[in-house]
Amino acid sequence: MAKAREKSKTFQSPRGTHDILPEEQRLWDKVRESIRVLSNFYGFERIDTPHFEDTDLFYVGTGRTTDIVTKQMYSFKTRGGDQLTLRPEGTPPIARAYVEHGMANLPQPVKLYYIGSFFRHESPQRGRFREFRQWGLELIGDEGAVADAQVIQVYSLFLQEWGIKDAVVEINSVGCQACRPSYRAQLTQYYRSRVRGLCRDCKERFRDNPLRLLDCGEEKCVTVKKNAPQLLDRLCEPCRNHFKLVLEFLDEMKIPYALNPHLVRGLDYYTRTVFETFVEGPSEASKTSPASSGDGAPPPQAAEDPPAKLPPKKLAVVSGGRYDDLVALIGGKPTPAVGAAMGLERLLMVIKERRARLPETPKPKVFLVQLGDLAKKKSFRIMEE
């Protein structure tokens, strides 16, 4: 009896990943070129780091108890015995490159940008993938508030140039090693009597790092968080002055922002300024409508029963902050730094939804020198005129 012929297997892209097809590449190329021009215009030079790094870099840099390290990293052991991880974020690799290549000996600050793929084992959903692309800015070697403001400004200008004019920056200060311990003690006291009402993850976070409780989006945890003490009330004088100056720069640049006293970001290395930039996301089908399949294809809809639409949700497209301790943490000298990253899949989703047009390419015409904080504030406006 003839052996039954085996049925050939049909392959698809792994769950949480996607192909960028030729018809999509034109828009991606325009976005990449716009990023290159704007980054160069503001003095940021491109850097590329490996797609995988020593796993310990993220244990030490990102933080051993963070969700990224405990739940989301793709790690593997090589045949030679090396423990490596596909990079889940861009900042620790950039800090590693800064130390490894002696960039502290260059004129400071060192201003770098990158575009590349990153990898996290998350639950795939619209705008969230397991392989995703980011545009990152890192400004290393400047402790001034003007550095924080410039990073925020570059992303804000990019969004405006693409016709995305409703962006709002949510911003907070998480203080420093001097003022954070007293706040942590106050926060621990607040949550101690409320820990039973938290989600399972937050019960574990309470033991490891209570600040991370403020980063949870679970409904019951958000309810408890509403009355939690605010770190802004506990800032030391240097941190308070730094944050005040950042906000003054944003006011001068007319960048819309909102104070979010419970914004902490989920990474251990942040100090002082942290922020996220939100835009209005696409409308979504209501939960009563059929859900998409696991492969991303929506189930068929009856013509007489279209899915209801919910109001648009806020969509975070940029996130970042200051990380003054990270370079020293991974073996360099104490070096102030600030950076952020934009999710490009999310950006492209918004651009397609709004049918945004390609922005005009800015061309530098003058070299501007400013001395003092007041001159720096005025220079932001002058550069855009």
Image (tube, helix red, strand yellow):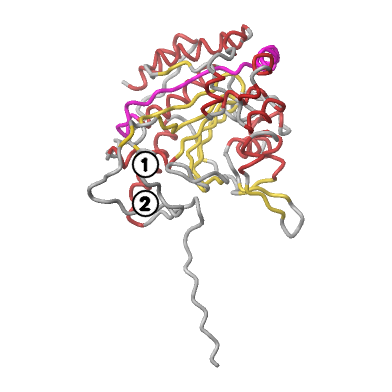
Position in image of residue 90 (x %, y %): 57, 39
Which mark lies nearer to you, 2 or 1?
A: 2
Q: Which residue appears farthest toward the top when viewing the image?
A: 237
Q: What residue lies at 38% left-to-right and 19% top-to-bottom?
A: 256
Residue 266 tag number: none
> Magenta stretch: residue 104 in it?
no
The furthest residue to the left: 304
Quarter of the image where the C terminus is located: top left
Residue beneath label 1, please? 349
Q: Position of residue 240 (x, y in %)?
A: 57, 9
Q: Residue at x 56, y 12 (%)?
A: 242
Q: Is residue 321 above or below residue 122?
A: above
Instruction: Describe the element under mark 2 as helix, strand or loop.
Output: loop
- Could you say where residue 359 lies in the image, as x and y percent from the top left? 30, 36
The kind of residue tagged 1 is Met
Describe the element under mark 1 as helix, strand or loop: helix
Identify which residue is drawn at 42% across, 28% down.
278
For the point 60% across and 37% down, which residue is it?
A: 94
- Asked whether 9 or 373 is in front, the reply is 9
Q: Circle 2: is it few (<14), some (14-19), or many (20+) Cα within 10 Å?
A: few
Quick check: 301 left or right of 134?
left
Identity, as a three-letter code, of the amino acid under mark 2: Pro
Residue under label 2: 298
Categorize mark 1 by other alpha carbons within 10 Å: few (<14), some (14-19), many (20+). Answer: some
Quarter placement of the N terminus: bottom right
- Span shown in magenta: 160-187
Percent of width and height locating residue 116 = 51, 45
- Residue 143: quarter of image: top right
